[in-house]
Image (tube, rainbow, N blue to C red):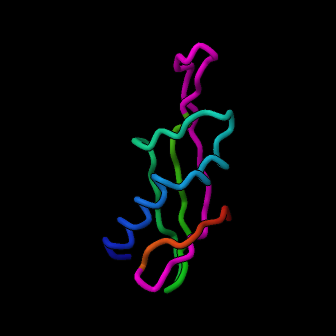
Amino acid sequence: MDDTLQHQVAEFLRRWSGLRVFCTQDGWIDNDTLRFEIQGGGQDEVIVAVTFEEVLVEGSGCVAGREPCFGRLRLKLDADGSVRSAEDW
């Protein structure tokens, strides 16, 4: 896969609130730990494996820990390669 697609996917994942479906304890997604691998697909979609750390917060707002999270997504692409939509897979 080319660098443009890698960039498009990275930008989409950093902004897409749907990644929260992979959080286990209603924490925050640490975008600095967000990683993905394009595992396959075609011209109009790709399958992506995602990993990140979920930041767990206490009631007082203090960080209580981190939990590794992962999942797979099917990303639908527009003709220009930008990501149109996503669904967990």
The residue sitting at 54% across, 60% down in the picture is 49
In the rendered structure, does residue 50 fall within the stretch colored magenta?
A: no
Marks counted in the figure total 0
> x%, y% of residue 32?
39, 41
Is 17 above or below relative to 11?
A: above
Is 29 above or below relative to 61?
A: below
Of all residues shown, which one is farthest toward the left?
3
> x%, y% of residue 45?
55, 78
> x%, y% of residue 40?
52, 75
Quarter of the rendering occupied by the N terminus: bottom left
Q: Judge by depth and name the residue closer to the eye, 43 or 82.
A: 82
Part of the protein shown in magenta: 55-80
The residue sitting at 44% across, 43% down in the picture is 31
The residue sitting at 68% across, 33% down in the picture is 25
The residue sitting at 60% across, 66% down in the picture is 86
Magenta stretch: dominant SS?
A: strand
Q: Is residue 70 left or right of residue 52?
A: right
Is 3 above or below relative to 21?
A: below
Q: Is residue 68 left or right of residue 12?
A: right
